[in-house]
Image: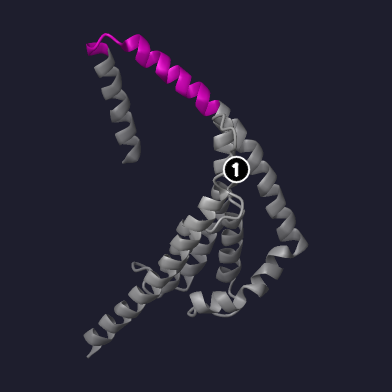
Amino acid sequence: MINYIWIGLLIIGFIAGIFNGRIDQVTKAAMDSAQSAVVVCFGLLGVMCLWTGLMKVAEKSGLVNLIGRLVRPIMVFLFPDIPKNHPALGAIVMNLVANFFGLGNAATPLGIKAMNELQSLNKDKKTATDSMCMFLVLNTAAIQLIPANIIALRTAEGAKKPADIIVCIWIASICATIMGIIAAKLLSKVWDEKKKARMW
C-alpha cells in the first residue's frame, strides 16, 4: 500500500511540474535527491558494517550471553510467561543489545527472530501475547547508548557536531521506555481483568 502512495505522490509531482512549467526543476530535484541518497547510504553502510561486526564479535566471545545472564532478573519481570532458557529470551536480548548500540537496521532481523520465537509460545495465533506487546514496546522505545545511524546521517548532511544530540536521545529513549513498560503492564492487567469478567 505504501508503495502505491509513493508512486502516486511522484506522479502527482511530475504532473504538477508539467502544468506549472517547472518540469526541469522537478527533474533536477529528483536527480539531486538520488545523488544525496547514494551518499547517505554509503555513509550508513560503513557504520552498519562496523557495528554489525562488533556485534558478531560480542556474540562469538560470549559477551551477549553474559549480558543475558546479567539482565535475567529484569527479563523475568518484563516477560514472566516465557520459560527459562527459552530461545526467545536470547533473541530478545540480542535485539535489545543491537538497539542499545544504535544498530536499528541490524537489529531488525534479530527482532523478527525474537517475535517468531514468541509466536511459537502463543496459544492464540491471531492475538498478540503480553510478551509480544512488551517486546514491541522495548524495541520501539529502544534505549540507545550510541545512536550510530543518526550520527552517521548527521555527518553525511554536514553537521558540525553530529554527536551533540546523544544526551537528548538518552533522555527521550529512557522516558519512552519507562512509560511504555508502565503502559504495557497496566493494559495487561486491564486485559486480564476483562478476560476474568467474561469467564464469570
Residue occupying the far bottom of the picture: 200
**Which of the pair 14/99 is nearer the observer?**
99
**Which of the pair 115/26 is nearer the observer?**
26
In the rendered structure, which amino acid carries the disc numbered 1?
Ala
Where is 193 relative to 64, above or below? below
Q: Which residue is mark 1?
A: 163
Q: Which residues are magenta?
A: 18-38
Q: Residue at 58% across / 50% down in the picture?
A: 102
Where is 28 relative to 180, above or below? above
Asked whether residue 132 is in view, the answer is no
**Left or right for 190, reference 155:** left
| Whole-percent x, y for residue 168 in the image | 51, 51
Q: Say how the picture is coloured.
A: one colour
Toward which corner of the image does residue 88 lie, by quadrant? bottom right
Residue occupying the far right of the picture: 61
**Which of the pair 158/105 is nearer the observer?**
158
**Which of the pair 33/129 is nearer the observer?**
33
Q: Main secondary structure of the magenta part?
A: helix
